[in-house]
Image: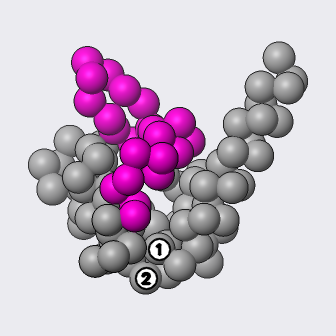
Amino acid sequence: QRWEHHFRSGARRADIIRHFGTITNGEFSVSLSKFLDAVAGAGLGVRQIKALFVEFDADGNGMLDMEEFTTLISKNKTIRSHFDKIISDAATRSLMTWSRR
């Protein structure tokens, strides 16, 4: 639970929004393809990642909102334990993409 509080902090939320998802009409969402790209380095296979995404997409709309996303991360020990690296890798990818422009 302590981890979840840290995860939901303002700084961590900003990292999540910046590197994982999009904001549409003021609502955060992350697509399966963006989620796959982001958590690929956590040591899970594509099938496992897709299954987790579908399992935690509570409303079945094909996107994870902030609550669904944070619930998935907080309940999956493998992703949670790699989360700082996932954020770091996402930041590196963003910088590389930005520098190519």
> What SS does tag 2 mark?
helix
Q: Residue 50 in the image: x percent, y percent? A: 41, 63
Q: Residues within 10 Å of mark 1 (few under 14, many from 20)?
A: some
Apparent side of residue 75 relative to residue 87 in the rendered image (left or right): left
Q: Residue 35 in the image: x percent, y percent? A: 48, 52
Residue 32's disc is none
**In the figure, 55 relative to 30: above or below?**
below
Q: Are marks 1 and 2 in contact (CB under 8 Å)?
A: yes
> Going 45% across and 67% down the picture, which residue do you hit?
49
Apparent side of residue 15 relative to residue 56 in the rendered image (left or right): right
Q: Residue 78 in the image: x percent, y percent? A: 49, 81
**In the figure, 99 relative to 56: above or below?**
above
| Residue wearing tag 2 | 77
Q: Is residue 16 magenta?
A: yes
The residue segment tinted magenta is 6-33
Apparent side of residue 52 relative to residue 71 in the rendered image (left or right): right
Q: Is residue 15 magenta?
A: yes
The N terminus lies in quadrant:
bottom left
Q: Residue furthest right?
A: 100
